[in-house]
Image (cartoon, rainbow, N blue to C red):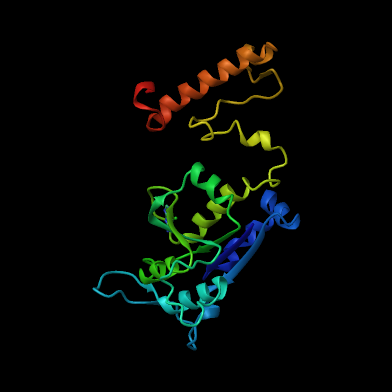
Amino acid sequence: MQIDIVTIFPEFFGVLDVSLLGKARRDQLLALGVHDLRDWTSDRHRTVDDTPYGGGAGMVMKPEPWGAALDALLGEPAAGDSGDDGEQADAVVIFPTPAGVPFTQALARELANERRLVFACGRYEGIDARVADYAATRARVLEVSLGDYVLNGGEVAAMAMIEAIGRLVPGVVGNPESLVEESHEAGLLEHPSYTKPQVWRGLEVPAVLRSGNHAHVAAWRHEQSLERTRRVRPDLLPDDQR
Ligand code: 6GU
């Protein structure tokens, strides 16, 4: 999978060199391109923002550098191509924004099947709305939110999404079975896990996990998942299971 990121803070993404995704890059399962939006400005001050039409606080990111960045990454529209004939670059362009659709494990799974993702990380009060409209004439576009709170920009959100998506790309996680029994895969939160020692600071590992009875273990884990989900995330359950 190829992932491109456009940002005014390319140094944020240094952490993608380490851990699981760093190894995936070295193993060439993931190709990551981090691009500085200011490379597509044309004035001496490398300006990326301006005051909002209609007034209000904060600044809005200008469309021109974003247009140039998207053209460079998606390919220029062909001469005479109005862009409205449905001809699309082979990529999904993702705008991280608290005003987007919720990012979920299901969306992560879907995006892990794409060949190419482009993350457009906005700052300030957002990006001129025409940029997403323009991008939609060139590629599939998603405005996606991590949750109901506000971050200063899309960078940290993009990083979280890239980690969630990247680990679902085949080969990135060494043992694919570890992806099956985790929180949100079955629509439930994960059961608690234990390792040795059997007693630690007076706290004992539940006996059923040491019973060797796989059916009992599976039933106990399911019950724990259900109990935990009811307690902390009843919204995940169908009405008749709450
Ligand atoms: Cl995707 N972006 C920003 N700026 N804030 C957020 C978010 C995204 N998701 C939750 N808060």
60 left or right, relative to 92? left
Residue 153 at x, y percent in the picture: 45, 62
Find the residue positioned furthest to the left: 54
* Residue drawn where x is 46% and y is 21% of the image: 227
Give 50 or 96, whichever is nearer the viewer: 96
Q: Quadrant of the N terminus?
A: bottom right
Q: Is residue 206 in view?
A: no
User: How many circles with numbers are drawn on the protein?
Assistant: 0
Residue 146 appears in the rendering: yes
Residue 78 lies, in percent from the top left, at 51, 79
Where does the C terminus fall, quadrant-wise? top left
Residue 72 quadrant = bottom right
Residue 132, quarter of the rendered image = bottom left
Residue at image coords 26%, 70% = 56
In this orientation, which residue lies closer to the viewer: 87 or 93? 87
- The furthest residue to the right: 27
Counting from the top left corner in percent of width and height, residue 199 is at 67, 17
Task: Left or right? Give the position of 209 relative to 104.
Answer: right
Taking the image as four quarters, which one is ligand 1 found in? Answer: bottom left
Q: For this rendering, which residue is in front, 194 or 80? A: 80
In the rendered view, would you say 37 is above or below 167?
below
Q: From the viewer's perspective, tell me whether residue 127 is left or right of residue 28.
A: left
> Which residue is depicted at the point 63% across and 66% down?
33
The x, y position of residue 47, in whole percent, is: 45, 81
